[in-house]
Amino acid sequence: AQSVTQLGSHVSVSEGALVLLRCNYSSSVPPYLFWYVQYPNQGLQLLLKYTSAATLVKGINGFEAEFKKSETSFHLTKPSAHMSDAAEYFCAVSERRGNQGGKLIFGQGTELSVKP
Amino acid sequence: GAVVSQHPSRVICKSGTSVKIECRSLDFQATTMFWYRQFPKKSLMLMATSNEGSKATYEQGVEKDKFLINHASLTLSTLTVTSAHPEDSSFYICSARIPGLPYNEQFFGPGTRLTVL
């Protein structure tokens, strides 16, 4: 069965500092991987997705993530945090095939705070 | 493109009443939609997969008689919380897939905040 683990329910960084949000997955077959961002009382917005075209994936708002099969990880990074990056971030996994119907399995979420 | 809307954005109801939440794909046809529930400071819990023209597939532990899902058209799925109780208060989010689009990407609605008094 697939699963996603996000290490750290809350991460706090200073404005301008590196952002690193950790995600590890478990899947019996090579998965699709996603990072979503959620602002308070809103739905989810896709930041980026891994589809096997390239292990380093660039997304919106300066975020990127690297797929590391050997580590079963898909950590999200941004070189310089902005105040507007403060939000909840979710890592999600989906199987490429099988009868899962394209379901997404979400991690527990990481709340990112950005200090001035 | 790929915009999903939900209505209402916020609803307050009395215990025992039923509440209907609509999920619409505005600029594409969605054969598959998903309904999630999110508790405060928690992740999204998939409740059910809604398929146009057929019965929804509910996740284990979700009461299908409590949470009625209807996907009557290619652009509309509805979630009805029947005989709502305070413990049903939550943030409900729907999502939709574009048929044929690879990678199982889902497009999310803005969510509906349900408060049951």
Image (cartoon, rainbow, N blue to C red):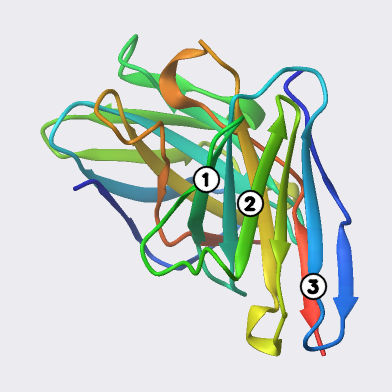
The span from disc 2 to disc 1 (Cα, nearest Å) is 6 Å
Chain holding disc 3: B
The secondary element bearing badge 2 is classed as: strand
Q: Earlier in the sequence, mark 3 or mark 2?
A: 3
Same chain for the residues under marks 3 and 2 in the image = yes
| Picture residue at 48% right of the left edge, 59% below the top | A109
Give the chain letter at badge 2: B
Quadrant assignment, res A66: top left
Q: Residue at x 35, y 39 (%)?
A: A93
Disc sitting over residue B18 in the figure: 3
Query: Considering the numbered disc 3 on the image, is that residue within a helix, a strand or a loop?
Result: loop
If you read the primary sequence from the N terminus, does the residue marked by circle 2 or circle 1 appear first? 1
Q: Quick check: A107 above or below A44?
A: below
Q: Earlier in the sequence, mark 1 or mark 3?
A: 3
Q: Nearer the viewer, residue A36 or B93?
A: B93
Give the spatial CA distance, label 3 vs label 2.
13 Å
Give the left or right position of residue A70, taking residue A97 as reference. left
**Camera-nearest residue between A107 and A102:** A102
Q: Position of residue B6 (x, y in %)?
A: 81, 46
Using the image, tell me which numbered label, if any, was put on residue A30. none
The CA span between labels 1 and 3 is 19 Å
- Name the side, left or right, on which A72 lies relative to B91: left
Please name the residue that numbered disc 2 is placed on: B69
Chain ID, mark 1? B
- Which residue has dot 1 on it? B56
Type of amino acid under label 1: Ala
How many other residues sit within 10 Å of disc 3, few (<14), some (14-19) or many (≥20)?
Answer: some
Residue drawn at (88%, 77%), measured in percent from left and top?
B12
- Cβ–Cβ under 8 Å for marks 2 and 1: yes
Q: Amino acid at mark 3?
A: Ser
